[in-house]
Image: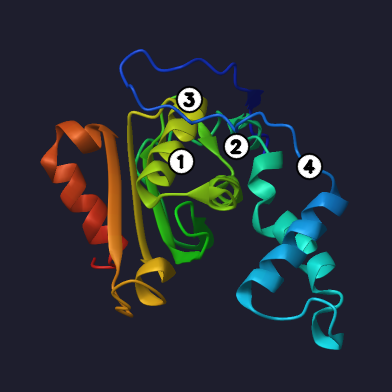
Amino acid sequence: MDDVVKTSNIKKSSHEQITATPKPVIQRPSRAEAEAAARVLISWAGDDPDREGLLDTPKRFVKAYESLFSGYEKDPIEELERIFEEVQGYKDMVLVRDIPFYSHCEHHLVPIIGKAHIGYYPSEGVVGLSKLARVVDIFARRMQTQEAMTAQIAGAILEALKPRGLAVLIEAEHMCMAMRGVQKQGVSTVTSQFTGVFKDEPAEQVRFFTQLRGIQ
């Protein structure tokens, strides 16, 4: 199929106040400094960083952090630049549901595990479905709150696609609540962001939730 593809000229929406939070600019310490910090934490926890089982843990810890927080090195807007304009006149809802993700609570640095669901009505075109999952991953692989992550995903999609309506819903379990504090396992937190027709027309929200749950 000869699709018309364009690179979006990103402009912030004039009618929505949701924006994608830019990644912070900081002076990063060296790898050696990071590994030294990991040794301190091991000692503070009450173990010996020089014993056999922990000897290489600081290196593995820092390497794991590079993966877990790789979202700081990526730009979500770049993932959404390639927009397909020729979609045979399709103007109905596009829904990508059950996008799995893991993140880390910025308050305690313990995991957040959940799923994201994204629905939108095309305006200027559509984006590759995998790109929406990549945007979720980019924001998830940062130190987060679920509320901020929901708004950031919505902001990036709004800037890039300018859809007639956008729905972002995230449901997740927070290990800071399951593993510490009140220690309640299995508790799910749900956050959502609606814009355009999803915000203005209640019937569209109903349709979104109906399709989300797989009810025909």
Q: Which mark is residue 197?
A: none
> Is 34 on the left-hand or right-hand side of 191?
right
In the image, is residue 188 above or below residue 51? above
x, y percent for residue 42: 70, 72
**Residue under pointer 3:** 159
Quarter location, residue 72? top right
Q: Amino acid at mark 3?
A: Glu
**Residue under pointer 1:** 153
> Is 84 on the left-hand or right-hand side of 175?
right
x, y percent for residue 147: 35, 46
Give the image's coloring scheme. rainbow
Name the residue: 36% across, 12% down: 14
Please, what secondary structure does the residue beneath circle 1 have?
A: helix
Q: Which mark is residue 29?
A: 4
Name the residue: 40% across, 49% down: 118
| Disc on the earlier residue, 1 or 2 | 2
Gap between marks 3 and 4 measured at Cα: 32 Å
Q: Total label count?
A: 4
Q: Please tell me how crowded label 3 is: few (under 14), some (14-19), or many (20+) other residues with Cα within 10 Å.
A: many
| Disc on the earlier residue, 2 or 3 | 2
Gap between marks 1 and 2 measured at Cα: 9 Å
Q: Amino acid at mark 1?
A: Ile
Q: Amino acid at mark 2?
A: Pro
Q: Are marks 1 and 2 in contact (CB under 8 Å)?
A: yes
x, y percent for residue 80: 59, 34
**Residue under pointer 2:** 76
Gap between marks 1 and 4 measured at Cα: 28 Å
